[in-house]
Image (tube, helix red, strand yellow):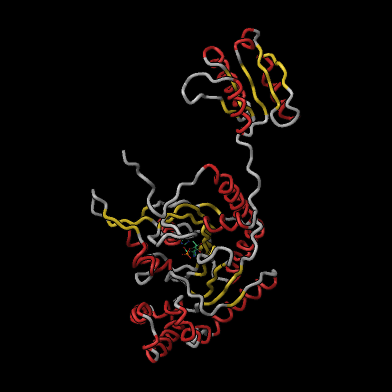
Amino acid sequence: MQKINAIRGMNDLLPKDAAAWSYLERTLADLTRAYGYEQIRTPIVEATALFQRGIGEVTDIVEKEMYSFEDRLNGEQLTLRPEGTAAVVRASIEHNLIYDGPKRLWYTGPMFRHERPQRGRYRQFHQFGIEALGFAGPDIDAEIILMGQRLWDELGLQGVRLELNSLGEAAERTAHRQALVEYFTQHHVQLDEDSQRRLQTNPLRILDSKNPSMQTLIEGAPKLLEFLGSESLAHFEAVQTLLKANNIPFKINPRLVRGLDYYNLTVFEWTTEALGAQGTIAGGGRYDPLMERMGGKSAPACGWAMGMERVLDLMAISKSVPESDPVCDVYVLHQGGDTLVQAMIAAEALRSAGIDVILHCPPDGQSASFKSQMKKADASGAQLALIIGPDELASDEAQLKDLRGTGEQHAVPLSGLLAAVVDALVDS
Ligand code: HAM
């Protein structure tokens, strides 16, 4: 029979990687608690219109990367979420989350984008994100950036750089856009095919072009920062002052535009050179226009999201994943029949007391030799082996063997098994 494989760009998370994921998830839980963020979980499938309107029609994500389909039963247009922000805003409007004041929220989970898979770029990937809804001041922009920096420090990541920009407000962007269109129209012959198309649809995205032959032209283009009014500038400067006061290094990158259309004012990305082409580990910014655009009452907001696979990759390079915890405390060996019955009862009793136990289950359903079982016990990482054979059963005993320290083995009465195991675990 032909085997069925996973979809290209969608990966299994195997047991060997699970410890690193759990460690990252625990660190993220601590981080959100330290800053008073509450968890929100939204569905993986949403109405396609949510992303069209939220992320913007003329973006790579909406134009070519979404997994969209029609619900066969009722004809609804649905999409696997490519990001989390639009849905968090939808949920906030739907449940009136900020009726009594601003909210600090976080989420994590799989996202889907039909991109060309390569290292760090997948079709199903995982994001951790935070969204601070209802806050207008530069203090919250700085707070969410501090959170990011704290996270990289906690994870021991090296070589992560922060790039910062301000996209100003809509009128300022319109003035800049006009200047850009004029500039690129004057230099039309130097534009590559993609940029010629973008000149008609979204000229700002030309600045994002990675094409080396376009870089000098892009370098000379009018910069948005030159078009910012006094309020936008004051916001941008206040964010920078707070970052400097907290010793957060950053570089202003006037070319940083982000690939989603909901941003205004502050935008930022954390990048690293250690991961090759997909070096952006997280990005975000302020998105004050989104709440109203999604049909809610106007409210300011900002946030960021990181790619968990990219951060885990960088953690592996930085060797910052701690040794994994042992899978269990006790490995129980037996010889089938009545000894299996007793072994299973003993294993359950130990688990009821909070001890982690693996019961040997032979793959062929037959009992295996103690020698081969002992190899499995050793490989499991367990501290102790508990051995129940026919001889032990006849005398209401079990053998307890220390697998890690002295290797010592001794008989314990089944009636006093729990106390003996607890003592041995404390000693080991
Ligand atoms: P984004 O820049 O599209 O922003 O994605 C955030 C992060 O997700 C990226 O920096 C990257 O690490 C990771 N990522 C994106 N696409 C892929 C992929 N195909 N494979 C692996 N990782 C990927 C957003 O999604 C915004 N919602 C962020 C935000 C939150 N802005 C405000 N609040």
Compared to 168, does 295 lie above or below?
A: above
* Above or below, comparing residue 223 to residue 47 in the picture: below
The answer to whether residue 89 is above or below residue 74 is below
Q: Position of residue 273 (x, y in %)?
A: 58, 67
Image point (52%, 24%), residue name: 361
Q: Quadrant of the C terminus?
A: top right
Q: Quadrant of residue 161?
A: bottom right
Relative depth, front residue between 352 and 191: 191
Residue at 59%, 53% in the rendered image: 28
Looking at the figure, which quarter contains the N terminus? top left
Tell which of 143 and 337 is nearer to you. 337
Q: Position of residue 14 (x, y in %)?
A: 50, 44
Can residue 101 be seen at all in this image of the molecule? no
Q: Quadrant of residue 368?
A: top right
Residue 222 visible in the snapshot:
yes
> x, y percentage for residue 15?
53, 42
User: Residue furthest toward the top?
Assistant: 394
- Residue 285 on image: x %, y %: 52, 69
Extreme residue in the bottom direction: 186
Left/right placement of residue 283 relative to residue 202 reads: right
Q: In the visual, does 273 lie left or right of 156?
A: left
Residue in the picture at 47% in, 79% down? 212
What is the total number of numbered labels drawn onto the structure image?
0
Observer-nearest residue: 144 or 1? 1
